[in-house]
Image (cartoon, rainbow, N blue to C red):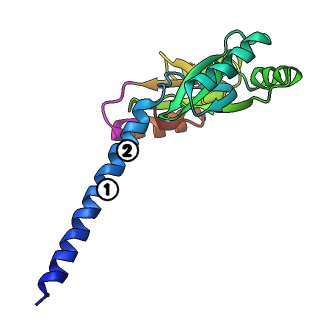
Amino acid sequence: MLKPTLSIAIALVAAALVLVSGLSGSATAARHACATQVYQNGLDVVFGRANTQAKADAITARAQRVGFSAVKTVQESCNVWKAVLRGLDSYQTAVAIQSEARRARMTPTVECVKADQIGQLQAVFGTRPTLGELDAVIQRARSFGYVGMKTKRAPCGGYQAYVAGFTDRGQAEEFVSTARQRSGLPVALIVA
């Protein structure tokens, strides 16, 4: 039989663990709530980060003064804001902007941006740098009966051709397997 003080100590430790795990989940949700939502994959050119919006606005203003008028201040987390040029679809374009900014004595970074997940299952038939190159993937899929393909920006630049609208994961996995075998394309299942 346990001594009463040992029983109380174990109960307190158990309660503390429950409380801490609940708080950490709440803290994660709170941090996520502070961030600006990302609706589209792509590339960002980040001109700088700051721990206040005012400091980030100063970085944004400097970037705009030297010719990058589309740079905006966005909130990355509860205590981090960034001056950023968003939504680029070409790595070459992002690097060219980065090089141009360096001439103005700014040191931006090129960063991959992935849209916030909405939980949609997608069968991705291919990823290509341009829409023109992606058309070859779409045409090949169409020649095997896969019509109604949609396109979207791919994470880190380029474009993807995909099919969505699956009722469950099993249906999506079966579709991907069959599409891979029939078309010879590297069809992949993702959650977008």
Can you give x and y, in whole percent of width and height, for residue 45 in the image?
70, 25
**In the displayed structure, would residue 130 be above or below residue 120?**
above
Residue that appears at 53% across and 31% down: 76
Q: Distance between the residues labelled 2 and 1?
A: 10 Å
Give amino acid for label 1: Ser
Residue that appears at 51% across and 28% down: 115
Packing grade of label 2 (10 A; few <14, some 14-19, many >=20) is few
Can you give x and y, in whole percent of width and height, for residue 18 in the image?
25, 59
Q: Does the magenta stretch include residue 74?
A: no
Q: Does residue 49 show up?
A: yes
Q: In the picture, residue 61 is in which quadrant?
A: top right
Q: In the picture, residue 54 is in which quadrant?
A: top right
**In the displayed structure, would residue 12 be above or below residue 120?**
below
Assign the N terminus to one quadrant of the image.
Answer: bottom left
Q: Is residue 163 left or right of residue 13?
A: right
Can you give x and y, in whole percent of width and height, for residue 78 in the image?
47, 34
Q: Does the magenta stretch include residue 170?
A: yes
| Boundaries of the magenta span | 165-172
Residue at the far bottom in the pictured view: 1
| Labelled pair 2, 1 in contact (Cβ < 8 Å) | no
Q: Does residue 143 show up?
A: no
**In the displayed structure, would residue 60 be above or below residue 166?**
above
Residue under pointer 1 = 21
Give amino acid for label 2: Ala
Q: Nearer the viewer, residue 103 or 79?
A: 79
Residue under pointer 2 = 27
Residue that appears at 61% across and 27% down: 82
Packing grade of label 1 (10 A; few <14, some 14-19, many >=20) is few
Element under disc 2: helix
Element under disc 1: helix
Q: Which of the two discs, 2 and 1, labels the residue nearer the N terminus?
A: 1
